[in-house]
Every structure is written in structure tokens, then in C-alpha cells.
Amino acid sequence: MLEADFKYIIDTFFALFSMVLIIFMVPGFAMLEAGLVRTKNVTSVLTINVMIYAVASISFLLIGYTIAFGAWENSSMSLWAAFLFQMAFVGKTINIMSGGVSERVRIIPLSLFAVIMGAFIYPSVVNITWGADLLAGTFLDINMYDLAGSTVIHSTGGWALLAAILIVGARKGRYQDDKIRVIPASNIPLVVLGAFLLWIGWFGFNGGSVGSISSIESANAVAKTIMNTNTAGLSGAIIAGILMHIRYKLFDITMILNGALGGLVAVTAGPDLYDMYTPILIGAVGGALVVFAVPLFDKLRLDDPVGALSVHLVNGIWGTLAVGIFVENISFVDQLKGVLLIGFYAFTLSFIVLYLINKVSQFRATDDDQLEGMDMSECGVEAYPEFKRSI
């Protein structure tokens, strides 16, 4: 066998294996969200996650991939493996958004938004960063470094979520007078399972983004990337746990897990560039940001049941800027420019699309439907029919 053929085969297998790990994040998001919402809304959340994967992936297949990369061609691995790897990312931007508007959003308008996100919004962000780059040579050209999408994926999803919350509003009864009504998670074991599925998926998310594993150099780069990814998650979990105990004398497992996810988001922009110690600091800051951002968003009455704004938007920004801070040859100005331009583009376009869809098919469920539960009004099937549902 020729060496070139061997590398082609190995890199094709690596892309397919990474894609499978990333797809593990689909049940990861589903279980995390199902555990954090009330039992009367679990079937609805699971249905939305399945629909997002299906609708966004088909939209990317038919339209989005060409917009992102300009052409269906790849010489280093199978074209189909390259496509599948890129397709695996698409739904994550919408998963971030859907989780943050859980318990009051209807399935049809959200699915319509998934089509637009998968076919146009996300692919156009990819185009000007990782892809064909229509803005190359212009003032708006984005030169930031973002290996696996702290900004391209996580912040894009976070900006879309912020736009959605502004349009949809808070859950009924979440904010009463000047008080914040605490709505506890319904199933902590599912939250833990979902978070660890996401954590495992991140190894394909970041490791696969190195692009090749068929040489000693690239194999070492993949291994270092995965190690640094894991380290940031560990650090984020530890810091979140410490800060929660200092503030409340309690260990909140949901906040510890979100701290870990915050660390993972933060390191995603440059895990291949850092030494083995820098991700400890980046993940620690990420975990701390989650702890402080969650109550801040509540004070602003931005109702986010899963903490997605804190995990994905805030840490997507921090992680991208961190590359410019800790990596010598990366310009902080370029990193900041990328964050600002993509933030403005993703938020503005998402808000316009969501606003227009909302005029045709209202995103927000009625107060009566929210009281009864989205499972019955949207799906007709309760996840826990033997349990008495809380209101």
C-alpha cells in the first residue's frame, strides 16, 4: 500500500470516528436538558433535540455545506467523511439555543429556525472563518484563530439564544414582582449523564478539528488537544464547586457540571496551541464565569433554564480572547475583531429571522399550555405519565 493511500484511509477513519463522538453530544444535550426541565416538559425537550439533529443536518446537506466551503471536494480524506464531520457540528448551534428557551417554546417555529440556521446562518459564519472566506482581502476579513468553534459554534449559538429569549420572554411564573422563582431540576441523574456525554463528545469536537492523525506530528497534536480539552473541563468543574461552596456552603452538582462545560467551551478555541498548564487557568476562569454569569442573567430577567448563555456565549467569548492573551503569535486584536463581528452578525440575523418566524408561527406557548406542560400540548405524550406533574 502506498503511504499516501494509507494516510488517506487513516484520516478518513479519524474523521468518521470524531464525527461519531460529536454525535454523542446529541443525546448529551437531550439528557442534560431533560434533566433540568420539569417532568411535564421532558418529551417536548427530547422531541426538539431529535428534530434539530434531523432538520439542521438535512439543511446543511442540501444547502449549507456549499455555502460554507464553496465546493464539495477534499483530497486528504474521503469527501463523504469530511462532510459528515462538518455536519456533526451544525445542530450544536441550535441545541445551545433550544435549551435556553425550554419549557415555553413551540416545536414548529423552532424547527423552522433550525432550517435557516443549518442552511444559511451557521454556514455563512463558517464561510468567513473556516471556509471559502468571501470577505478575504476586505476590511471585514476575520483572521481570528478558533480551532473548533468557541466563537464559530458556541458564541453563534449563544447569540441566537439571546435573540430568542428577547423575543420569547421568560417562562410563566419565573419572575414574580421583584422575586426570582427557583425551578429545580427534575432529574439530576439525567443531568449528570448528559453532561458527561457532552464531555466525551468534546474529544471528537476538538481532537477531530486538528484535521489529521496520519503522521507522528499530527498524532501528537491530536493527543495534546484532547488532553488540554479534558484538563480545562476538570479545572472548570473544580472551581465551580469551590465557588459554590464558598458562596452557599453547598455543592450544587448542576453548577459544577456547567462549570466543567464552561471550561470545555473556553478551551475549544485553541487547545492545540497551549502547553499542558495553560488550560488549567483557562478552564478555571471559564468555570468561575459560569458561577457569576448565571445569577447575573437572572437579575436581567433573561430566563435560561439550562445556563446556556453562561456556558456557551460568555465562555465562547472568553475562550476566543484567551488565545490572543496566552498564545504569543496570535493577535488579541484579531481575536476581539472576530468576536465582535461574528457576534453582531449572528445576533442581528438571528433576531431578524426569529422575529419574522414569530409573526408567522408564534414561538411562545400560551400560558395555559405552559401550565399544563409542553408534553401534552405539543406532543400528546408525557415522559412520566405515572407521576403527578408539578405546575
Image (spheres, grey):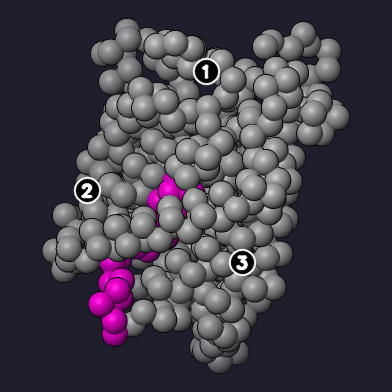
Name the side, left or right, on which 280 lies relative to 308. left
In the image, residue 158 lies in the stretch drawn in magenta = yes
| Discs 2/1, front | 1
Is there a contact, CB below 8 Å, between mark 3 and mark 2? no
In the displayed structure, would residue 280 be above or below residue 257?
below
Vertical side of 327 occupied by 266: above or below: above
Query: Which numbered disc, 3 or 2, marks the residue closer to the eye?
Result: 3
Q: At x 29% / y 20%, what residue is drawn?
A: 242
The mark nearer the N terminus, 2 or 1, is: 1
Instruction: Say which element carries label 1.
Output: loop
Looking at the picture, tell me which residue is in the foreground, 222 or 36. 36
Residue 57 x %, y % = 67, 61
Q: Which residues are magenta?
A: 137-160
State which quarter of the image contains the C terminus: top right
Q: Give the label, 1 or 3, closer to the camera.
A: 1
Q: Label 3, label 2: how many angstroms apart (C-alpha)?
A: 36 Å
| Residue matched to label 2 | 278
Which residue type does callout 2 highlight? Thr
Q: Residues within 10 Å of mark 1 (few under 14, many from 20)?
A: some
Pointer 1 residue: 174
Q: Residue at x 25, y 63 (%)?
A: 337
Q: Earlier in the sequence, mark 3 or mark 2?
A: 3
Q: Can you identify the residue that label 3 sits on? A: 119
